[in-house]
Image: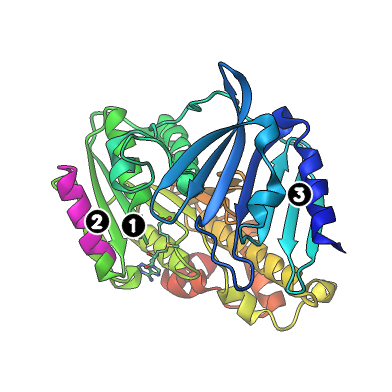
Amino acid sequence: MIEDLDKALSRAQEVLTSPESIRRICISGKAKGKQPEQVRIDIRPVALKAGLHWQAVSHDGKRDTTKNLALGELSLARLFKLGYANILIESTSQEINLRLTKSGEAQFSIKRVELDAAELAHDRSKERLLSADDEIFIELGISDHNGKLKPSRSDKFIQVQEFLKILSHSLDEKRDKNQELKVIDLGCGHAYLTLAAHKYLKKQGHEVKTLGIDERQDSRERNVALVEKLKMSKEITFQATKIANLELANFDIAIALHACDTASDDAISWAVKSGVEMILVAPCCHHDIQRQMKEAPAPWNIAIKHGIIHERVGDILTDSIRAGVLKILGYRSDIIEFVAGEHTPRNLMIRAFKTGAPAQRADIAELEQIITQWKIEPALMVRLKDELSVRLG
Ligand SMILES: C[S@@+](CC[C@H](N)C(=O)[O-])C[C@H]1O[C@@H](n2cnc3c(N)ncnc32)[C@H](O)[C@@H]1O
C-alpha cells in the first residue's frame, strides 16, 4: 500500500512499543541521490543489566560499530532520513516492510508470521556446531577479529551451521570414526562451507581430507592462501575447474551449497558417476527447466501464465526430478528444508544416500511421464543418460 512517508514511519515506530516482541530491524538501501554513511543498520532488543535496550549495529562495508540505545532513544524516522530506502521489522507476529518509492512516498506492507521470540541475551550464542569465534570464521571474514559474528554475514553463517547439522545427523546414521572421510565441496566459492564442514568433522574425531572445487581461479588462490594461514593446507586442497571437467574420483561425501543453476546438476551427476555414498546438495537458481516449460500439460497451463508461479513450478519440477533420478540410480533420496527461509530463499536440500537398491518400475514410469508431459529434457538426465538408460530400458 502506498502512503505518506511520515505516516508510514510513524506506523512502523508504533510497532516498537512492544520491544520484547521484535526479533530484528534492518534499515538498508539508498534513497535516490543519497549516500548514507553506513551500508545498513541492524537493530535488535537486548537485555542489559540496566534493563531492555536496543542494540544497533551499523555496518559501513568494512567494519561493524555497535551502540546500545535506551528504548525511547530509537527513532526510525531519524535513522531512515539519513538516506535509506528500506526498513524491515520482524516481530513474533508480523513482518513489516517499508520501502521508499521513486515519488518519495512509502510502500508499506504487513505480512502475518508466527515466529519465536528473539533471544535477548546481550551476547547471543545459540547452540552452534562451530562457534562464531572459531578461527575459520574470523579468517573467512564472517566474524570480526574478536570472534563476534558480523550481522551482515549472519545469513551465510546460519546457512553453514544448518548445513552442518544435516551433515552431522546424516553421519550419525552411517559412519565409523576410524575411517578417513573424503569430502568434496562442488562450487565451493569462498569456501565457507568447505572449511566449516572440514573443521566440524575433525572436531567429531574423524580423519578428514577435503577438496574444494570452483571454476574460478581467483577463488582457488584466495582459498589456498587462507588454508595455508590456518595451517590446514595438508588436509584441505582446492582445484579451479568446471565440475563437468573434473575427473571422477573416490569420495565419501559430496556437498554443494548454492552451486548456480545446472552446476547443481553437474555436482549430482559427478557424485553419482564417482559412486559417492552421501550427497548433500542445496541448489541455487533453477533456469534449465524453467526455460523449457513453454507448454504445460493440462490442467497446468494456469500455473505457467504468471511469472512467479511459472518459476516456482519450475523449481518444484527441477528438484523433484533430481530426487527421482537419484532414487532410480540406487540412492535413498529426499528433499528437506535445511534452513529457515528468512536466511535464504534457496533453502531446500536434496539429500541422497547410496543403497544400490534396484530401480522401481513405478519410479521409472513417474519420471518418464513427467518429462513426456512437460516436453522437457532435464539437465541432470542429459548428464546421466548412460546410467539412466540401463535402468529405464
Ligand atoms: C553462489 S556461489 C556459492 C559458493 C559457496 N558454495 C557458498 O555457499 O558460499 C556458486 C559458486 O559456484 C561456482 N560455480 C558455478 N558454476 C560452476 C561450475 N560449473 N563448476 C565449478 N564451479 C562453479 C561459482 O564460481 C561460485 O563460486
Residue 115 image position (x, y, % from top left) = 71, 35
Residue of label 1: 190
Of label 1 and label 3, which has the lower sequence position?
Answer: 3
* Badge 2 element: helix
Residue 339, quarter of the rendered image: top right
Work out whether residue 159 can be spotted.
no
**Inter-mark Cα distance, 3 to 2:** 39 Å
**Label placed on residue 210:** none
Question: In this view, which residue lies farthest toward the bottom?
Answer: 294
Secondary-structure class at tag 3: strand
The residue to which callout 3 is attached is 96
Q: Residues within 10 Å of mark 3 (few under 14, many from 20)?
A: many
Q: Do the residues labelled 2 and 1 touch (CB within 8 Å)?
A: yes
Q: Name the residue under label 2.
A: 223
Q: What amino acid type is highlighted by mark number 2?
A: Asn
What amino acid type is highlighted by mark number 1? His
The quarter of the image that holds ligand 1 is bottom left
Is the CB–ligand 1 distance for label 1 below 8 Å? yes
Residues at marks 2 and 1, CA–CA distance in whole angstroms:
7 Å
- Mark 2, Cα crowd under 10 Å, few <14 / some 14-19 / many 20+, is many
Q: Is residue 195 magenta?
A: no
The one nearer the camera, 97 or 27, is 27
Q: Residue 372 location, x and y as percent?
A: 67, 76
Q: Are marks 1 and 3 in contact (CB under 8 Å)?
A: no
Identified at 70% across, 32% down, the residue is 72
In front: label 3 or label 2: 3
Q: In this view, does 9 lie to the left or right of 280?
A: right
Q: What residue type is labelled 3?
A: Ile
